[in-house]
């Protein structure tokens, strides 16, 4: 019996890290530190990474499998665990690795979601009892998108990503397509062409659809692959970009329709030829709650 308990204690536990899309994104200003003020609706998806965590009693925080192109010291999972340990003076540690499904640098918040999942999961596994608000404040130190994932509900977002209000959204099916181009979020935000003075909008206007992604104009100009992917996807349904790209998405009435378009991407490779780059894609439904919502009060 003792062996069984011991074995269980030392096993990795899987924790989901859902991706997000930005249903719109307006840039309304810029803070003195260079960060941009925005308005956006963030939507959780039932698609994402899985973070595997095994608590340790010696205080070490170790990545047990590499993520290509991300050094251990820069890995948002490791940074999140270290930040939490320092903040709470916990003597606990953890072994961590991620099964990556969310395309990196895709504007789908993959790294930020991994970090939020580590904070939520370790708050539980290390029995820290931190409140959601405290975890959100810690998350903001890691990235502008992290607070949303800890908040754990679809949100109307303002500030640089830290002012969050829950928003009810219909159960929608999305097709998400990611052209394989590397887009730096910092570069897009610092572009001379970016407009930073969109007038503040309201939830009522969002519901009429009279909103856009202000970063999309800049990305379209600099990355023809993204511009072409948007044109191609627009044949089927209104297509928009998420975050700072490269992913684009469209809503479909049902999963069959979304899968049919995805099949065209995967089988005929017509989009690859048109956009002149590799693309990946997936179908997903919107979630109402983060699967780990109950791990914080
Ligand atoms: C564009 C979005 O994806 C929308 O969801 C996010 O706001 C970006 O969030 P993120 O990837 O977590 O961003 P961070 O890692 O905090 O910032 C990356 C870089 O983007 C720029 N940045 C980001 C967010 C923001 N509100 N203003 C900015 O100017 C900054 O130059 C920053 O150095
Ligand atoms: N665990 C991680 N997973 C993915 N990327 C990570 C991770 N840790 C650090 N990074 C770094 O963060 C960068 C951004 O990755 P991410 O997948 O979050 O981009 P993104 O979806 O465009 O983010 P956002 O939508 O927040 O702008 C990567 O290019 C990588 O260098």
Image (cartoon, helix red, strand yellow):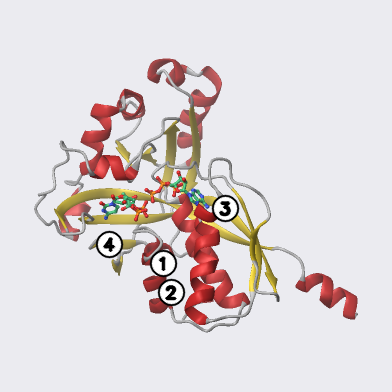
Where residue 192 appears, as percent x and y from the top left, is 16, 37
Kindly state the secondary structure of the residue where label 2 is placed.
helix
Upstream in sequence: badge 4 or badge 2: 2
Distance between the Cα atoms at labels 1 and 2? 6 Å
Specify the label residue 135 is tagged with: 2
Q: Is mark 3 within 8 Å of ligand 2?
A: no
Dividing the picture into quarters, in which one does residue 52 lie? bottom right
Residue ID for mark 3 = 72
Q: Are marks 1 and 2 in contact (CB under 8 Å)?
A: yes
Say which residue appears at 22% left-offset and 63% top-offset: 159
* Label 4 – label 2 distance at C-alpha: 19 Å
Q: Position of residue 164 (x, y in %)?
A: 29, 67
Residue at 13% in and 43% down = 195
- Nearer-the-camera pick, 70 or 96: 70
Q: Are marks 3 and 4 in contact (CB under 8 Å)?
A: no
Q: Do the residues bearing badges 4 and 1 touch, measured as CB atoms within 8 Å?
A: no
Residue 285 in the figure: left or right of residue 99? left
Residue 139, which numbered label?
Answer: 1
- Between the residue at mark 1 and the residue at mark 3, the CA separation in whole angstroms equals 18 Å
Work out which quarter of the rendered image holds the N terminus and state it. bottom right
**Residue at x 26% of width, y 30% of height:** 220
Q: CA distance from mark 4 to mark 1?
A: 18 Å
Q: Residue at x 70, y 75 (%)?
A: 58
Q: Looking at the rendering, which quadrant does residue 29 occupy?
A: bottom left
Distance CA(mark 3)–CA(mark 4): 33 Å
Write down the residue under mark 4.
Answer: 156
Q: Residue 76, percent across and down?
A: 49, 57
Q: Secondary structure at mark 3?
A: helix
| Discs 3/2, front | 3
Foreground label between 4 and 1: 1
């Amino acid at each position: 019996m003792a062996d069984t308990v011991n074995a269980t204690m030392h096993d990795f536990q899987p924790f989901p890290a859902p991706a997000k899309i930005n249903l719109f994104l307006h840039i309304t200003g810029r803070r003195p530190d260079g960060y941009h003020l925005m308005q956006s609706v963030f939507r959780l998806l039932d698609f994402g990474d899985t973070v595997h965590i095994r608590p340790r009693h010696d205080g070490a925080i170790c990545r047990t499998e590499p993520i290509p192109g991300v050094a251990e010291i820069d890995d948002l999972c490791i940074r999140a665990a270290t930040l939490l340990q320092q903040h709470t003076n916990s003597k606990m540690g953890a072994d961590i690795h991620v099964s990556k499904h969310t395309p990196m640098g895709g504007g789908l918040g993959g790294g930020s979601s991994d970090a939020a999942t580590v904070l939520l999961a370790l708050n539980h596994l290390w029995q820290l009892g931190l409140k959601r608000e405290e975890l959100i404040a810690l998350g903001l130190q890691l990235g502008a998108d992290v607070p949303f994932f800890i908040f754990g509900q679809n949100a109307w977002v303002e500030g640089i990503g830290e002012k969050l209000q829950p928003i009810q959204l219909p159960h929608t099916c999305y097709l998400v397509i990611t052209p394989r181009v590397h887009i730096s979020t910092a570069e897009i935000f610092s572009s001379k062409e970016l407009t930073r003075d969109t007038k503040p909008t309201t939830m009522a206007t969002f519901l009429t659809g009279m909103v856009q992604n202000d970063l999309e104009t800049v990305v379209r100009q600099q990355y023809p692959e993204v511009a072409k992917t948007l044109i191609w996807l627009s044949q089927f349904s209104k297509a928009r970009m998420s975050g700072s790209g490269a992913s684009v998405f469209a809503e479909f009435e049902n999963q069959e329709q979304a899968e049919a378009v995805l099949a065209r991407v995967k089988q005929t490779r017509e989009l690859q030829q048109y956009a002149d780059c590799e693309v990946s894609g997936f179908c997903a439904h919107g979630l109402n709650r983060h699967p780990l919502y109950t791990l914080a009060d």
